[in-house]
Image (tube, coloured by chain):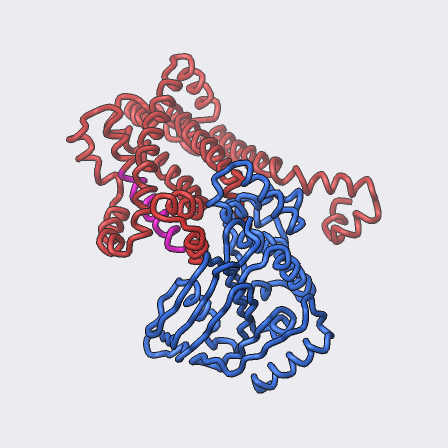
Amino acid sequence: MKKNNNIKPPGSEISANPEKAISNNFRKSRYPRFGLPTLVLFGILLIWFIISYTNLFPAYALPSPGAVWKSFLEEIMAGRLINDIIASLWRVAVGFVLSAALGIPTGLWLGQHLRARQAFVPMLNFFRFLSPLAWIPFAILWFHIGDKPAIFLIFMATFFPLAMATMAGVATIPSIFFRVARDYNYKGFELLSKVTFPAVLPQVITALRVSYGISWVVIVAAEMVGCQDGLGYGIWEARNGLRLDSAVCYMIIIGLLGMGIDRLLAQLTKLPTVRWGYER
Amino acid sequence: MKDKTSDSRLVFENVSHSFGEVAVVKDMDLTVISGEVVVLVGPSGCGKTTILNLLSGYIEPVSGTIQREGIIRTVYQSDGLFPWLTVSENISLGLRSLKNASHHKKEMDDLIELIHLEGFENHYPHQLSGGMRQRVELARVLAGDSDILLMDEPFSALDYQTRLRMRRELIRLLEKRPRTVVFVTHDIEEAAQLADRVLVLSSRPATIRRELIIKAPRPRDLTDRAVIEAMKEILTELGL
């Protein structure tokens, strides 16, 4: 029966058997969206389990799922995990908000002034290609240990891409919008806030999501050197104690939190005033 | 709301324009008087849009003088609406000079009714059909205190039947709210159906080759004698 299904074109089955058609429809709508990723997840867990069960790698090099789960409970009980999550989220939030608050206006300004672009773009590009990790020595010398060096590193990692993306967005605004704005006497700040900004907002939201991704990657590295807590510090400490089970536990948390917050940012694309930017 | 076209006027005196070496408009004299519908027809690339840009003041001519009296607004071919604003927010761009909230509301209701888009006030442009979007554009330029409408092939992005309907729509709107209109098109039917005066342009650099006055009352059917005769004359003038 199963073999037959594979050979038949999918349509023929639907017309022959209405009950099947319903289950097929169900498949089409919900199964792939939630079912497939769950399937992949379980597949990977299974492979992981098999590898660690058969001792393909020594336990200290590849912790088993059970060991990771145990260390997860341990970290939760000790309150460390929650503390580290809050510390990392706080640093990312501050660095990210700072860089958005400065980077987006900078991008708008650059986008509107040719001379400013000519003057600053080469320098912006230079800094954009400089890995934020290269700033670690300065971060620690200038800001010592604590939240500040991490925030500084996140700022350095996200300011330049955000400003550049906003600037590029302004450059691609169709000139017709400015002509209409001129017909209706938009000038100066009103032009910027009522025309230029809403016209680039869809692209700015995309840039925010990308640079949020960067900052979530950078925070781990930043906390390994400049902090006494945070998710990155947790991994570093796990390494020092040769507790890879704890390191994997932290890695899973970092990945899940990153995904979750990106889903939140993705909600911004559903705002009615930016929908147009994603529907062409 | 304004129902007179009192002092609007557009005058070209000996206007020439070029982009670098390419002469686009040459020694053009043109006077558009209050309440008149002037249609410019010409081969593609002859500089029609440049003439509109000169009329609106978006560009200044290389030589010659242009007088503009009255508030000028432009209807574009497509995508002239701000996509981040709803239908009523887009129309209220045209009502920016109206400070009184209750006047504003009344005028908005009038305009929505005028273009038959009741119920679509809070829709965004990307949720509307091409014809509906152009009707919103028409409402926006007719709103408030505008005097002169420049139209840059406003219906050319629409399908044929919608285009025919929009011509009627424009005539109807202008009857309710008379304005001075300069309409640029490559569509000869459109010119013959809409114009008080058709100006046939030569290929680049644009000069006025022929002026054709059509006296028949509007709305004119495509098959009306006056329309067919005007079309014949325009076609001959264009060498088609």
Q: Is residue A145 left or right of residue B182?
A: left
Instruction: Confirm whether the magenta stretch covers residue A157.
Output: yes
Asked if one can make out residue A242 in the rendered structure from this viewpoint, the answer is no
- Chain that the image shows in red: A
Q: Is residue A174 left or right of residue A21?
A: left
- Chain that the image shows in blue: B
Is the residue A201 above or below the residue A80 in the image? below
The region drawn magenta spans A156-173
Q: Is residue B97 left or right of residue A37?
A: left
Q: Position of residue B48 (x, y in %)?
A: 48, 72
Q: Position of residue A52 (x, y in %)?
A: 47, 30
Instruction: Give the overall secondary structure of the magenta segment.
Output: helix
Rendered image quadrant of residue A220: top left
Frontmost residue, A151 versus B20: B20
Frontmost residue, B113 versus A242: B113
Rendered image quadrant of residue B38: bottom right
**Quadrant in which the N terminus of chain A is drawn:** top right
Frontmost residue, A161 versus A255: A161
Instruction: Confirm whether the magenta stretch covers residue B97.
Output: no
Residue at figure coordinates x 52%, y 32% from the top left: A45
Is the residue A7 above or below the residue A22 in the image? below
Is the residue A129 above or below the residue B204 in the image? above
Frontmost residue, A173 versus B223: B223
